[in-house]
Image (cartoon, rainbow, N blue to C red):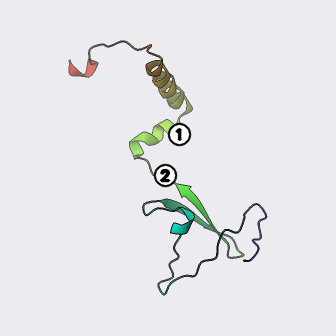
């Protein structure tokens, strides 16, 4: 097996593209619905970065530190029983 240009990468296996230029990664633990960002270096090396898609309405949580911290505080309050039952304000 060859050596990569980046020493932080460890060669794992060698694969051959099929006649439609596809390679299979199932032996490496990749499942059918997994998503990846594919990056290419000028040397031809490909880097697969695992990705997760989220609904756009949830993106605010990841982009806004204050919203994220508030949400995490609320989840911690629930986990520690610091939340009491109350009427749903949206039902009035």
Image quadrant where residue 85 sits = top left
Q: Position of residue 4 (x, y in %)?
A: 75, 71
Q: Is residue 12 above or below residue 80?
A: below
35 or 88, which lies in front? 35
Answer few, some or many: residues within 10 Å of disc 2's Cα (few below 14, many 20 plus, some between 14 and 19). few
In this rendering, position of residue 83 left or right of residue 12: left
Which residue position is annotated with label 1?
63
Q: Position of residue 42 (x, y in %)?
A: 70, 74
Label of residue 52 in the image: 2
Q: Is residue 43 above or below residue 69?
A: below
Answer few, some or many: residues within 10 Å of disc 1's Cα (few below 14, many 20 plus, some between 14 and 19). few
Quadrant of the drawing holding the N terminus = bottom right
Q: Residue at x 30, y 13 (%)?
A: 86
In this rendering, position of residue 74 left or right of residue 15: left
52 or 66, which lies in front? 52
Q: Residue at x 76, y 66 (%)?
A: 6
């Amino acid at each position: 097996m060859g050596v990569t240009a980046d020493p932080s990468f460890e060669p794992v296996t060698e694969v051959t593209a099929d006649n439609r230029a596809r390679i299979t990664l199932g032996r490496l633990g990749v499942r059918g619905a997994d998503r990846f960002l594919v990056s290419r270096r000028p040397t031809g090396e490909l880097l697969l970065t695992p990705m997760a898609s989220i609904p756009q309405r949830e993106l605010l949580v990841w982009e806004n530190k204050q919203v994220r911290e508030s949400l995490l505080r609320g989840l911690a309050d629930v986990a520690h029983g610091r939340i009491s039952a109350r009427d749903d304000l949206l039902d009035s």
